[in-house]
Image (spheres, rainbow, N blue to C red):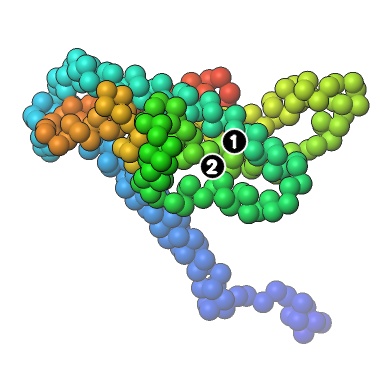
Amino acid sequence: MMQTSASHSPSLPTARQTTSVRMPGPARHYGRYLYLALNAAILIFLLAPIAIVVVFALNPTPFIQFPPVGVSLRWFEKFFASRDFMQALGFSLEVAVLTTLSATVLGASAALALARGNLPGTRLIVATMLSPLMLPAILTGLALFQTYVLLDVGRPTWGLVAGHTLVTLPYVVRTTLAVLHNFDTRLEEAAQNLGASPLRTFFEVTLPLIKPGVMAGAIFAFIVSFDQFPVSLFLVSPGNETLPVTLFNYLKFDLDGTIGAASVVSIVLAFVVVIGLDRTVGLRSYVKL
């Protein structure tokens, strides 16, 4: 009886077994700390230039000094009082809005055609439309400049908008295709079976469902167009210069906090655009992309 009860009694873990069970705990903690430290380092790397620009814009001295000797808005006053900067800011906004509209319409239409049209060579077409992302923008600007010279059209505003649209179109195409990849076409078929016309089906069923991807592409298009420098450098005309080109020309003769103030205005403007779309559309749906 004693042997039978002893044989069924649970055996105690040895010291080696106990050690092997407890080992993964500290290892998981170290891995988590390493992961958090890596993410913190990436955030610091990304946000450090913005912090330096803000310090440069608020520093009263005409050069970068750390720690700053004080806080001053003199460079913002100089920026908003400059006629050249204000004209360049307005022209950049105009070009960015026109580019966003054209890139959004063309990109969303192209994405729908690629996803629904059963076109031959779809992969080649998609790769061609995304090629401006792989080609250096300065080469794109140079090629467009040579094209306009051969066509003898000069450097009009529509030519600049066309160049920006070419660069920003891939963003709209890619984000819209990402939404259409998981789109349930049975919803469109149900609407048409209930008597809706193709046009009404598009505006009341298709467009609301793909709107997150379209609006995400529009955000990218606006920001990329507003900050576009290489293409604008070749396509702007005297008197109609974008803000990045004006800042580049300003740096040739002077370097003070006005550059930082203009950069802060650009950052705030992009932030306002994102917040505005978040209020109207909602950026939570973009996470699905």
Mark 2, Cα crowd under 10 Å, few <14 / some 14-19 / many 20+, is many
> In the rendered image of this protein, does residue 25 appear above or below residue 142?
below
Residue 73 at what x, y percent from top left?
Answer: 17, 19
Q: Is 126 on the left-hand or right-hand side of 120? A: left
Report whether residue 40 is seen. no
Query: Toward which corner of the image does residue 229 lie, by quadrant?
Result: top left
Q: Residue at x 11, y 32 (%)?
A: 254
Q: Is 254 on the left-hand or right-hand side of 85? A: left
- The amino acid at mark 1 is Gly
The Cα–Cα distance between marks 2 and 1, rounded to whole angstroms, is 7 Å
Q: Are marks 2 and 1 in contact (CB under 8 Å)?
A: yes
Q: Residue at x 57, y 50 (%)?
A: 128
Q: What label does residue 107 carry, if any? A: 1
Dot 1: element: helix
Judge by depth and name the residue closer to the eye, 135 or 24.
135
> In the rendered image of this protein, does residue 274 appear above or below residue 110?
above
List the single residue furthest toward the bottom: 3
Query: Label 2, on which residue?
Result: 170
Q: Residue at x 28, y 42 (%)?
A: 48
> In the rendered image of this protein, does residue 39 appear above or below residue 78?
below
Dot 2: element: helix
Judge by depth and name the residue closer to the eye, 266 or 5.
266
Q: What label does residue 166 carry, if any? A: none
**The C terminus lies in quadrant:** top right
Decide which of tag 2 and tag 1 comes sooner along the chain. 1
